[in-house]
Image: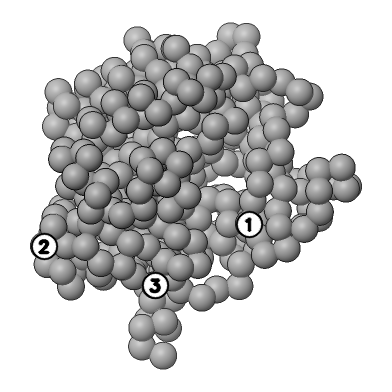
Amino acid sequence: MPHPQVLCLGEVLFDYLADQAGVGLTEVASWTAYAGGAPANVACGLVKLGTMAGFIGSIGRDVAGEVLVQILATTGVDLTGVYRHPTLPTRSVYVLRSATGDRQFAGFGDDRPPTAFADTALPADVLPVALFAQAQYLVLGTLMLAYPDSGQAVQKALDLAQTYGLTVVMDLNWRPQFWPDPQAALPRIRDAIAQVTWLKLSQEEAEAVLQTDDPGAIVRQFPNLQGVLLTQGDQGCRYWIHGHQNDYPAFPVPVVDTTGAGDGFVAGWVHQLCQSQGQCLATAESIQATIAYANSVGALTTTQAGAMAAQPTAIAVQTFLQQQLDP
């Protein structure tokens, strides 16, 4: 198998989505499990689009972990970087859905604390250095910064990326429920942002963590960034890329579940960078086309339940874009 062009570091887990939309936690009658976890979603999304990707993260030695590994393997994701923790279980996350498909965190099940899962304990010394030596991109989130072991693994990955010249894409992915001490989150996240090339975040995350939803203002805070991608759900995306600041509207689709939409966007963005070797950002016009592609992947991902289930192929994206741009 060829070496993965993109390494996705972080969590893989089961999202338990409420089968009944628009109801409170006590009114949910049943849940359905879907494979998820932002970096794993991105890895699967990239492979479906045609870019080789590998997942790096920790799972439990349990049925849930093995099922998730099989899902990633069947998709074609490189699993060299998967670590099986000897005692901690694979994480589950329970998610409520509004009548319009928006999601709301509802806990980890059985009143477990956020620290009780295998993804918190990825040892830094098990990172597959050989993969970093061959890859071009590293994609990661911020949830692993919340825990000592996985936080050290993130820093080592950033160090390896610098050593081997990888471009780093960060999805801020602000989830205060994952942090044992949310007050400790902001300085750690800011320190990590200062080490990456591209930052993707939602409008709500930008306001909560960086106190501004202006992509240009974020770049002024972090001059290391080559670009900021600020997604706004059905309002599309605003961005600052190589000095170009603009926006692109969302594509209208029948939304079933917004889980994984941002991850689909990231997969579409990184896929375009890989396919063009960065030339897709050479002009203002080509940047707009790249954002349109990423928006389309994100939009299509919302048309079915589950973060991975609706991820499109490159042919599906091309067909969708032709329909949208040349009706």
Q: Quadrant of residue 171?
A: top left
Q: Relative to the observer, which residue lies in front, 138 or 210?
A: 210
Q: Is residue 8 visible?
A: no
Please determine whether, in this image, residue 281 is positioned above or below residue 156: below
The x and y percentages for residue 296 are 42, 67
- Mark 3 to mark 2 CA distance (whole Å): 21 Å
Q: Residue at x 42, y 66 (%)?
A: 236
Whether pointer 3 and pointer 1 mark residues with C-beta atoms closer than 8 Å, the reply is no
Q: Relative to the observer, which residue lies in front, 327 or 152?
A: 152
Q: Residue at x 31, y 54 (%)?
A: 214
Quadrant containing the C terminus is: bottom left
Name the amino acid type tagged 1: Asp
Q: Earlier in the sequence, mark 1 or mark 2?
A: 1
Q: Helix, strand or loop at disc 1?
A: loop
Q: Earlier in the sequence, mark 3 or mark 1?
A: 1
The x and y percentages for residue 271 are 30, 54
The x and y percentages for residue 85 are 55, 13
The x and y percentages for residue 157 are 29, 23
Residue 249, numbered label: 3
Q: Which residue is mark 1?
A: 102
- Mark 1 to mark 2 CA distance (whole Å): 35 Å
Label 2 Cα neighbours within 10 Å, binned few <14 / some 14-19 / many ≥20: few
Please determine whether, in this image, residue 28 is positioned above or below residue 272: above
Q: Is residue 192 visible?
A: yes
Side of 264 where 92 appears, left or right: right
Name the amino acid type tagged 3: Pro
Q: Earlier in the sequence, mark 3 or mark 2?
A: 3
Q: Which residue is mark 2?
A: 282
Side of 291 where 121 appears, left or right: right
Label 3 Cα neighbours within 10 Å, binned few <14 / some 14-19 / many ≥20: some
